[in-house]
Amino acid sequence: MFRIGFVFVMLLCGILALSADQACAAGSTIKIGMIAEMTGSFSDFGFNIVNGAKAYMKEHGDTVAGKKIELIVKDVGGPSPEVAKRLAQELIVKDKVDFIAGFGFTPNALAVAPIITEAKMPTVIMNAATSIITTKSPYFVRVSMTLPQTTEPMAQWAHKNGYRKIYTLVADYGPGHDSEAAFKKAFTKLGGQVVGESRVPLKNPEFGPYVQRIKDSKPQAVFVFLPAGEMPVAFMKSYNERGLAKAGIKLLTTGDVMNDNVQDALGDHALGVISTHHYSVDHKSPENKAFLAAFAKIEPQRPNYMAVGGYDGMAAIYNVIKQLKGVIDGDKAMAAFKGMKLNSPRGPVLIDPATRDAIENIYVREVKKIGSHYYNVEFETFKAVKDPGK
């Protein structure tokens, strides 16, 4: 009788323990490590990426497949490869994250690639835009764009609209080199001529001499890529002070330069500037309306394309968690990312199963004043654009 009672008690304890383990598993946490530029002159990058991710969580909840979602944000401070590498190691070894995400800058993403590959850590690039990034680790997926992807349509649009002589000015790092090469290749292939080229340093450039060189070359237009933040504002100041607009030199840019959340600061100086990009805050769609409403609950400042990168990156991660029923495996996660379709605030997005890059619409926009505010107003669409280098 004693043995039967003992066995019964042990079985009961086992059932209770199993139930407790299952309850614990059902309520356990999936950790997402965010490596982002939260301080310094490029803090706007991290601010938008992280708040975009939080906006998605605000709209869709912080529990997926029975697992609580936790963001662990690490400040990389700017383009700092060694810091990014250290932070990635901390997130994997100390914080034991299930995903890594973020990356405003290419050098930071490239620096962590070997660590990501060794750990088989699914990693979502939410902004960094050099074409080669996804080739450096099979565990990278990108939900933003590449610079060739947004630049080639500008070259095509410019030629179609009668521009034949154009000067290029880009920031002197990976995305700038990509943008310069893509524009030159596409524009000259159509019969256009690049009459001059300038590369400017990322830190504290004095734009005056560069802008004067552009003016002296007498092109019909200047094509510009600079990372979002302080550099485009400084360039626009020199562009206007040196009288390029008055000289009839049209300004053509990527959307990084005509960043949505600096449009009001640029004011009338930016009116009429043409840019190509994958997102505008003025984009007309139910998805964008929902995104803007969710973002406003996190931060009253106008979001930009990096915020959409954070938002869509979280959408992709949530989809993977659902597909894997909350049990995260690096290889299975990457298989789930490939071919994924997102109904993004920017329009339809497909993660290319071959390259793990986004295939998406690229819009031609013009800066216009609507009421008392300034917007990049879309007026032409290049549909389902892939990175032309892949």
Image (cartoon, rainbow, N blue to C red):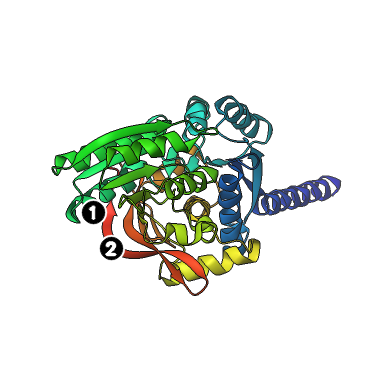
Quadrant of the image occupied by residue 56:
bottom right
State which quarter of the image contains the C terminus: top left
Query: Can you give x and y, in whole percent of width and height, for residue 11 in the image?
Result: 74, 49
**CB of mark 2 within 8 Å of CB of mark 1?**
yes
Secondary structure of the residue carrying numbered label 2: strand
- First in sequence, mark 2 or 1: give its number: 1
Residue at the far right: name it. Answer: 2
The kind of residue tagged 2 is Glu
Query: Can you give x and y, in whole percent of width and height, for residue 163 in the image?
Result: 21, 50
Residue that appears at 49% across and 39% down: 122
Numbered mark located on residue 157 in the image: 1
Numbered mark located on residue 253 in the image: none
Up/down of 234 relative to 206, above or below: below
The kind of residue tagged 1 is Trp
Secondary structure of the residue carrying numbered label 1: helix
Q: Is 19 left or right of 231, judged from the image as shown?
A: right
Judge the density around disc 2: few (<14), some (14-19), many (≥20) Cα neighbours within 10 Å. few
Q: Mark 2 sits on what residue? A: 380
Residue that appears at 43% across and 34% down: 209
Q: Is 9 left or right of 358, judged from the image as shown?
A: right
Q: Nearer the viewer, residue 103 or 328?
A: 103
